[in-house]
């Protein structure tokens, strides 16, 4: 089901004054996309986004509870923003996102100057919630999970004109319930966005100039399993790949259990599907995987990797690694190092375990000392840095197809007669390269595919010349 964003009765009309909304976004890409949807539902009320909280009539903290001490960080940020209420009687201060979902009305008790609390499932209702707050209906906490049948996806419209690459949410929630993870409690059960809506959003984005989309969800490769007669993930990839004008297709995040042969076979077959796959493994020990409630073995995982690489030898694999899970022994940790050395990921997200209240792992003894967790994390990072350096060095003198995103952060470094542009290879590696200043650089290159020959390898990126 998709939601049409309608103007509530108290929306300013005609030439009425604009209001400003400031949203501070914490956490993952899902939250970044949610912030875009917040701006989208507020646009009919003539709220304009602002980067300056002192101008805002509405301030929202879009929170994440995956990271440690999320609530304390959010509370201290609220404390920093609260004095703005002394200068603007109409200012509404709210908390959205996963911490809001977890805490609900308790947050209103803890923070007397807070006006609204809203979960990720309630973004479509934000205009009505605001109406209640502004009409003097008191302070509002709205954190109800919509059921599978009732969940309303907001049909996304492009929020940032000129962007080359965009995210498209294809589902929400997660049914896996890993013992360390808070997401199933803050985002609810899996609900897949109807395939025709996903395709329509991609078509709209492509028409606005987007050339690359990343399909987004907590567990995208279980897409479609929650609905009868819904295409599954590989079929959705095929449908999106067929959108005219789309150059590149990516997706994140996946679960090894749902990494089917049919999905793997899409690589190398679908023109737009990039040779990059984020496949979180978490650790290299079957016992720890079981304790994490990750229902696969290391052998199964390595089998998936082997099949992927036999189809696409230059596949860039990335992963998530957690060290210091309750009960993780030195030998089990070394198994994780061995796995990293065997798979040779192009990048990893590595974390120390820390308990999240309400998860099953939080009731297990957190028995790996903090200093030991830190040592394990450092070892993982040191090993991975060496793998990545060797991998990047291998790119020297080779030519890659780069999708140009815009001027690089150090655009002037191209030299006195050149500007430096930035793009990515299909494997998602950043490449900077100069183009002549007189080359109408911004118009001509952005959104184009450029062949670039690598002449320098930096620690996190490549540098090259147009081939
Ligand atoms: S699959 Fe991912 S999002 Fe789902 S519970 Fe496990 S870690 Fe959390």
Image: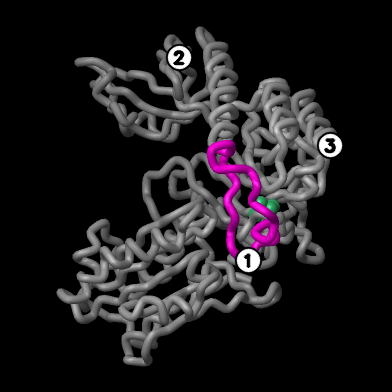
Q: In the rendered view, tell whether residue 98 sits above or below residue 216.
A: below
The residue identified by callout 1 is 358
Extent of the magenta region: 351-373
Helix, strand or loop at label 3? It is: helix
Answer yes or no: do the residues labelled 2 and 1 have beta carbons within 8 Å? no
Question: Mark 2 or mark 1, which has the lower sequence index?
Answer: 1
Q: Is residue 395 left or right of residue 295?
A: left
Residue 364 within the magenta-colored segment of the rendering = yes
- Label 3 neighbour load within 10 Å: few <14, some 14-19, many 20+: few
- Label 1 neighbour load within 10 Å: few <14, some 14-19, many 20+: some
Cα separation, mark 1 vs mark 3, equals 30 Å
Q: Quadrant of the N terminus?
A: bottom right
Q: Is residue 421 left or right of residue 230?
A: left
Q: Residue furthest top?
A: 397
Residue 314 sits in which quadrant? top right
Determine the residue positioned at 26% across, 60% down.
50
Answer yes or no: do the residues labelled 3 and 2 have beta carbons within 8 Å? no
The residue identified by callout 2 is 457
Which of discs 1 and 3 lies nearer the camera? The answer is 1
Answer yes or no: do the residues labelled 1 and 3 have beta carbons within 8 Å? no
Q: Give x and y (percent) for residue 323.
A: 63, 39
Helix, strand or loop at label 1? It is: loop
Question: Mark 1 or mark 3, which has the lower sequence index?
Answer: 3
The residue identified by callout 3 is 300
Q: In the rendered view, tell whether residue 213 sits above or below residue 20.
A: above
- Label 2 neighbour load within 10 Å: few <14, some 14-19, many 20+: some
Residue 298 sits in which quadrant? top right
């Amino acid at each position: 089901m998709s939601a049409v964003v309608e103007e509530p009765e108290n929306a300013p009309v005609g030439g009425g004054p604009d209001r400003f909304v400031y949203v501070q976004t914490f956490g993952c890409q899902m939250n970044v996309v949610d912030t875009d949807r917040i701006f989208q539902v507020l646009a009919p009320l003539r709220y304009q986004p602002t980067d300056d909280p002192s101008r805002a009539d509405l301030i929202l903290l879009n929170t994440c509870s995956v990271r440690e001490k999320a609530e304390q960080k959010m509370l201290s940020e609220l404390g920093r923003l609260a004095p703005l209420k002394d200068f603007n009687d109409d200012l509404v201060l709210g908390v959205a996102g996963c911490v809001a979902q977890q805490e609900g009305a308790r947050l209103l008790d803890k923070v007397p100057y807070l006006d609204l609390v809203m979960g990720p499932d309630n973004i479509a209702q934000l205009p009505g919630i605001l109406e209640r707050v502004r009409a003097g209906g008191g302070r509002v906490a709205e954190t109800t999970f919509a059921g599978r049948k009732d969940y309303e996806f907001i049909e996304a419209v492009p929020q940032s004109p000129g962007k080359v690459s965009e995210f498209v949410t294809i589902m929400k929630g997660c049914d896996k319930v890993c013992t360390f993870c808070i997401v199933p409690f803050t985002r609810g059960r899996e609900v897949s966005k109807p395939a025709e809506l996903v395709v329509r959003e991609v078509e709209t984005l492509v028409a606005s100039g987007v050339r690359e989309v990343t399909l987004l969800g907590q567990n995208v490769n279980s897409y479609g399993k929650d609905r009868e007669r819904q295409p599954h993930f590989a079929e959705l990839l095929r449908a999106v790949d067929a959108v005219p004008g789309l150059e590149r297709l990516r997706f994140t995040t996946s679960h090894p259990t749902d990494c089917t042969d049919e999905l793997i076979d899409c690589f190398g077959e679908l023109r737009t599907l990039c040779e990059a796959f984020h496949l979180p493994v978490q650790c290299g020990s079957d016992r720890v995987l079981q304790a994490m409630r990750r229902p696969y073995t290391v052998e199964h995982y390595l089998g998936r990797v082997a099949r992927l690489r036999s189809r696409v030898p230059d596949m860039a694999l990335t992963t998530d690694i957690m060290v210091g899970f309750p009960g993780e022994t030195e030998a089990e940790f070394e198994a994780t190092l061995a796995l990293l050395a065997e798979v040779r990921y192009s990048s990893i997200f590595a974390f120390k375990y820390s308990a999240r209240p309400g998860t099953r792992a939080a009731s297990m003894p957190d028995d790996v000392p903090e200093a030991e967790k830190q040592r394990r994390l450092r070892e993982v990072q040191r090993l991975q840095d060496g793998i990545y350096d060797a991998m990047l060095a291998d790119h020297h003198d080779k030519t890659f197809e780069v999708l140009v995103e815009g001027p690089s952060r150090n655009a002037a470094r191209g030299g006195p007669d050149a500007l430096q542009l930035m793009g990515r290879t299909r494997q998602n590696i950043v490449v900077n390269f100069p183009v002549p200043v007189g080359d109408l650089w911004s118009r001509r290159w952005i959104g184009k595919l450029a062949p670039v020959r690598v002449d320098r390898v930096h620690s996190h990126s490549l540098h090259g010349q147009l081939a």
